[in-house]
Amino acid sequence: MDLTALRFAHPGTGATPRHARSAQAGAAAAGAPAHGIRPEIQALRALAVSLVVAWHLWPSAVPGGFVGVDVFFAISGFLITTLLLREVEASGRVSLRDFWARRARRILPAALTVVGACALATALLVPVTDWGRFFGDFRASTLYVQNWHLAAQAVDYLHASDGPSPVQHFWSLAVEEQFYLVWPLVILGAVLATRGRSDRRRRLVLLGALGSITAVSLAYGIAHTRSHPADAYFATTTRGWELGAGALLALLPQRERSPAWVRGLLSWIGLAAIGVAAFAYTNATPFPGLAAALPVLGAVAVIRAGAPGAAGAPTPLLRLAPLQRLGDLSYSVYLWHWPLIVLAPYALHHDLDTPTRLGILMLTLLLSLLSKALIEDPVRRARVLTRHRARWTFVAAATASLSLLALTDLGTHHVQAEIHHDAQVTRRTLAHKPKCFGAAARDPRRTCVNAKLTRTVVPTPVQAPKMDNAPCKVVESSGRLRVCAFGAAAAPGVRTVALIGDSHASHWRSALDAVVKARGWRGLSITHTSCPYSAGTAIIPEPARTECVQWKAQLKTWLGKHPEVDTIFFGEHATATVVAPRGRTEWEAQVRGYQHAWTALPASVHHVLVFRDNPQMRSATLGCVQRALDHHADAGRACAQPRARALPRDPAAVAAAHVGDPRVRTIDLTRLLCDRRSCFPVIGGALVYKDIHHLTSVFSATLGPYVERQVTALGIR
């Protein structure tokens, strides 16, 4: 979860969060209307779940398959509003208790079963490195706040490299559950406000209330997608109008006034709209925003058309038995397919290949059939629940939910205990200052071997993500600019150097700290997450993009006012991208962006030292290291990555080599991180990475003597 705007990464495909970081899936947990199954709605369910599953398994084949979510939302809005309106017309009221009890019996049994199965599978198959994230998602899904949980993570760069959890797809269920809580209250309010009035008056009030809410949500969704796409994707406030569109359809007169051939054409147009969105949209499409209107209105059109019998209408296609059966299973299919996709690599110890994907598809259908027959239908029809007061349903639901929450707490406490224990081991190991620890094991000037460190990993993969970079004290904070100091205190005659860049600059601080302390320098760290110091505009979601532009402008002004800073160390993420002007490639834009930014530095800056960026590991690397540690294996060798894959071209290093400014030089520590063939996640007993590409502060500190060595070689005293 992108981060840039998050959608799901696809395990085994190398795809990254859109954002992410994310993640698509949606399922209508809707029951049939009171007057029987509508074949066009069942077929729409089948189409929607097919798009979602195909997008998750073969994203390049159906690049916009995520629009199946929006089709489900429109269906749910229509069906739930239809059921509530029928209750109002029959009894003149809305029983919130009975409505919520019916929803609980329909949705919770299968959903809680899936969450419980995922928790058990996690305990059996998943390295403890992923437990904290997984169990946090299990908790959020059980409470039906997964969408807000993901929205918060979508704008948190620290989660940008996180892989998906088995229940991230519950975000759309959370949206629907929140709709089920609020929508009946709106309808009840309209009923109370029109008590004693005609049915026509009541419908007009409902139309005004629901229409206003839908319009506000649509306007907000369009604006928020433009300004905050990362969290807009998951927010109920930006998605509410999609359910509202279906609800408004339910308020329209249901008498068939159009000829059958017109309704047949309308049905084809609706199906075409969904198909166009599914195959024309991509992760680059701003979503939901106005783009979501195409699949939503397509679904509304198909529902409005019904099942016309005119020649040439799609009704025979929609009535096909396999489609109807898949529509009936759509909720279960949706629930089971994503956990299987996420957990399969843990069970099989390899990324998804075509046979595995086909196996997941078959297993999804099997589990869906079993879930429907053994869990969903029996619980929904259980006489002990349907013939007694609704509180029996609520008690059963609360008991099951609390049991799952207790299970997630056990998993979370286990992780916290592991972190506490590992922190103590780390402190003891570092206190002993073992020979050949960390980068010293790859010193190019002398061979250094310590057999005792072969099966040591400090910090552990569980502890590392929670560890901060080297500390520094904030000495100035204004606007977007935050300056923190390390090393010697400011004083006459004390040299001041600055460390500038994105989060990769921050992880070099531990290494640079050793240099400034050895030389008696004062260091200033000025960094901005996901914002390379480049003349180009970073390709990151708003509002982070605007904040990045502001930060760079403030920093340029600040440097002009601080001539005491005569040496700057730059650290940038090699894969950070900038907007390419017309006529230039993305690579050219990256290289020239750095060159222009450096040559524009004030003349008071005498030395510009650019760190060649470090390698990047696979998302499963920490889990691999944990498994190797559990089996007392050499994690560094067992989990090494091919150098050609792990070490991307670095535009900053290329820019430094060709900028033509004698102030600009490169510090390249690759020799300490890789050999000719491989790059290692554990070196000399030290864990190199805290995630995919950020160095641990422990390993970074061991690079200090080698940074000092290169600074000396460059003639800087």
Image (tube, rainbow, N blue to C red):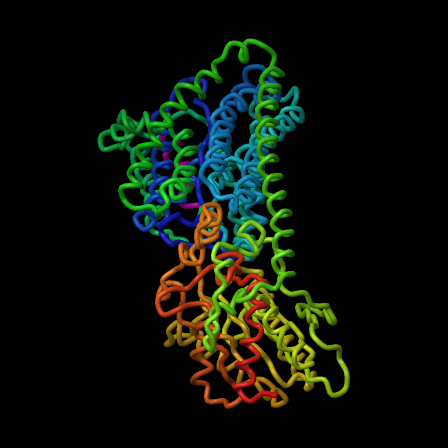
Residue 708 sits in quarter = bottom right
Give the farthest residue toward the right: 491
Nearest the viewer among 257 and 139 is 139
Would you place residue 675 above or below residue 297 in this image?
below
Nearest the camera: 156 or 224?
A: 156
Image quadrant where residue 584 sits: bottom left
Q: Is residue 110 magenta?
A: no
Expressed as whole percent of the image width and height from the top left, the position of residue 524 reads: 67, 75
**Which quadrant of the view contains residue 18?**
bottom left
Is residue 423 left or right of 21 when viewed as pictured?
right
Do we see residue 205 in this rendering? no
What's the residue at 38%, 23% (across, down)? 370
Image quadrant holding the C terminus, namely bottom right
Where in the figure is residue 702, as x and y percent of width and height? 56, 68
Q: Is residue 185 left or right of residue 276?
A: right
Residue 102 spot, x, y in % from top left: 53, 20
Residue 419 spot, x, y in % from top left: 61, 48
- Is residue 624 in sight in this rendering? yes
Magenta stretch prevailing secondary structure: helix
Position of 96 relative to 585 (above/below): above
State the residue in front, 329 or 83: 329
User: Which contiguous range is marked in magenta?
Assistant: 293-307
Residue situated furthest left in the rendering: 311
Q: Determine whether 692 is above or below 103 in the image.
A: below
Q: How many marks?
A: 0
